[in-house]
Amino acid sequence: MTPDALNALVDLLGLEALEENLFRGRSQDLGLPQLFGGQVLGQALSAASQTVDPSRRVHSQHGYFLRPGDPHRPVVYQVDAVRDGGSFTTRRITAIQKGRPIFFCSASFQGEEESITHQTTAPAVPTPETLQEGDARLERFPGHPIEFLRIDESAEPGEAARKRLWFRLVGELPDDQALQRSLLAYSSDFNLLTTSLVPHGIAFRDPRLQIASLDHALWFHRDVRVDDWLLYDMDSPWAGGARGFARGSLYDRQGRLVASSAQEGLTRLRS
């Protein structure tokens, strides 16, 4: 994988400033029926971050997908400076195509503070190197810097369906947490919703399946690097009403919980 692929993704999230609190981003076509949700998640967070003092880092992002985006058209991001408080900064971001909102989200930023701390223990799984020495296959999108190493999928009766994998962006990135966290938001949308398909043996590209993200929530717990392997531990405790729900925990190589995610999406199966 050449550095150009990662540079292109970084550039995708860079955005063009059109006016105060107004930005425009290019789109990428990943061969999906609509614009990849991770793109608008990452670009929206990038737009918000450009309006916030760098000493404050995003700790949560909550968004709703309103309409399918067009991967062949740019997206305009309007940022509303909701609040600049003594400890927290809040932004509301609307993504627009063809004059209509396709996505909106809120993002909250906070300066560094010390207080109580705890976390769940990372699951005991093989390292990326161990998996590559075995039979694991490295998965990549053609010309894209993200790569995956799948560990396992399971769906025991009465228990949440589960999917575990390692992922990273190939190349070297600057130690810029605004960029790293925007790229994490982008990457967190891969594989999450499809965890709700595991118990049913339905493939993502099954022609009977209509699947699309409805919302996406992400919590950033600590500094992160997406140019090193991250473990994505996902589970789906419920599906019904043509919707699937999934949660994710993201750990770094040292077993530190760096972020958590949750998503509900349309999982309509046509006869």
Image (cartoon, helix red, strand yellow):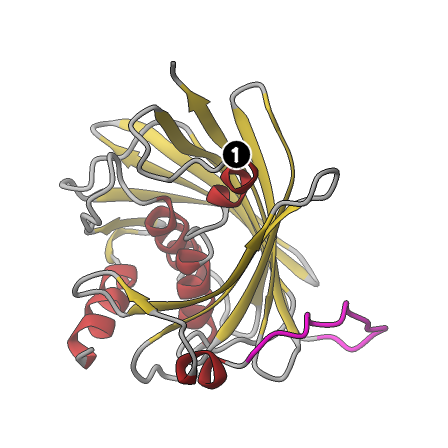
Q: Is 134 on the left-hand or right-hand side of 26? A: right
- Residue 204 location (% of width, % of height): 37, 40
Q: Is residue 182 above or below residue 44?
A: below
Q: Amino acid at mark 1?
A: His
Q: Nearer the viewer, residue 91 or 35?
A: 35
Q: Main secondary structure of the magenta part?
A: loop
Quadrant of residue 36 within the rendered picture: top left
Residue picked out by circle 1: 200
- Residue 57 location (% of width, % of height): 56, 68
Q: What segment carries the magenta color?
A: 113-126
**Residue positioned most to the right:** 116
The secondary element bearing badge 1 is classed as helix
Q: Nearer the viewer, residue 214 or 132?
A: 132
Residue drawn 37% across the image and 27% down it: 209
- Residue 210 location (% of width, % of height): 37, 26
Residue drawn 74% across the image and 75% down it: 113
